[in-house]
Amino acid sequence: MNKTMTVKDAELRLDQMKNGKIPSKEVPTLANPMYAKAYDGFLRFGTLCNTLREGTDQAGGYLVPDEFEKKIVDALAEKNILRKLSTVKQTRRNLKIPCATGTGHACWVPEEGEIPETNGEFDEISLGAYKLATMTRVTDELLEDSVFDIEDFIAQEFALRLGQAEEEAFLDGDGVGKPLGLLRQLSRVVVSENAGYITMDDVIDLQHSIEPRYRENAVFLMSDNAVRELRKYRTVGFRNVWEGDMQNDTPVKLLGVPVITCRPLPNVESGSMPVLYGDFSRFLIGDRAHRSVKRLNELYAHQGLVGYTVSERVDAVLLDKRAIAGLKVK
């Protein structure tokens, strides 16, 4: 095995020399084309070599190369609305983040006068990492087909599953083995005037529950059911209050603010929170290092299949509780 691995490493190095693409020693392992090519051989044929060892994770899988990671992240953003709106950072450890809970103010001070202390209030929040994983199977015939893009298949297949699970947890996770959801982190909640349904007056109250400085980049996040209910409202002149293209049930703006439909948000019913409003860039998603893939060679061999598992570690926190508010149905 060691001899085979050494030969494979030599082939990879020779290939780089032939193409004149030998990166400098400063290039990180996961950005090295040699690692990416070794990784492709691992995914397609299960080929192991010393080059891969630098990307081994603690659970025995291999960290995906940078280009492959970007494929997965881009695919995840397509499936998970909050990843498009939020701030996403890659972390290497648990973080303690100081966050302002109050706002300090400036004072007029006479010449050579003492400047009074007007510090804002601060709190500390934690950004950790919860593991999310899924598995799929691919036939031997597909893997042997050079036209089949195994990386693209894994990125798209797993992004769909991970994206749905992420979005549900990011919105309403209970914090047990998964992130604590945004709905559970809100401190600004507007309750509808009427039991069981919402009106445009409620939406206006929601909009004004957020300070003007947060409204510049604000959007509405609504369940499809909430969008349907609010689309029925008209102005005094019976004009629709929605702006923009209404085709394909995709309203563009309400009260001049972009509206994004979010599947996991609940229907309009008593006790639910079907509408959120604010600057979602203040919601931080932390990706812990790179995602990892394992190849299961033997488990499904009798069926002519190869199994793959993908795992990630992720958490999410609301950095500024003044930036987002929710509309709760009475």
Image: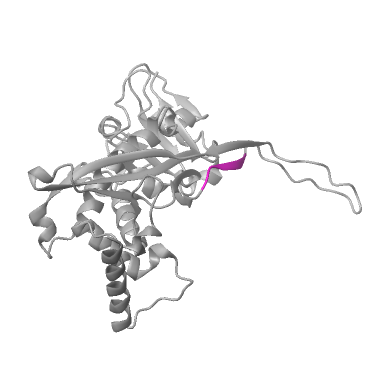
Vertically, is 25 above or below 285? Answer: below
Indicate yes or no whether the magenta region holds residue 301: no
State the residue at coordinates (49%, 31%).
185
Indicate yes or no whether the magenta region holds residue 97: yes
Q: Is residue 190 left or right of residue 165?
A: right
Q: Is residue 258 visible?
A: no
Q: Main secondary structure of the magenta part?
A: strand
Q: Is residue 18 left or right of residue 147?
A: right
State the residue at coordinates (19%, 44%).
136
Vertically, is 208 above or below 64? Answer: above
Percent position of residue 50, x then y: 35, 63
Q: Is residue 5 left or right of residue 120?
A: left
Q: Is residue 62 visible?
A: yes
Which is more toward the observer, 69 or 105? 69
- Residues shaded magenta: 93-99
Percent position of residue 10, x then y: 31, 73
Name the quadrant of the C terminus: top left
**What colouring does the structure picture have?**
one colour
Vertically, is 328 above or below 319? Answer: above
State the residue at coordinates (13%, 60%).
148
Percent position of residue 245, x then y: 24, 49
Number of numbered discs visible in the structure rendering: 0
Which is more toward the observer, 138 or 172? 138
Quarter occupied by residue 263: top left
Which is more toward the observer, 4 or 78? 4
Percent position of residue 173, x then y: 39, 30
In this view, the residue farthest toward the right is 112
Which is more toward the observer, 266 or 213? 266
Name the quadrant of the N terminus: bottom left
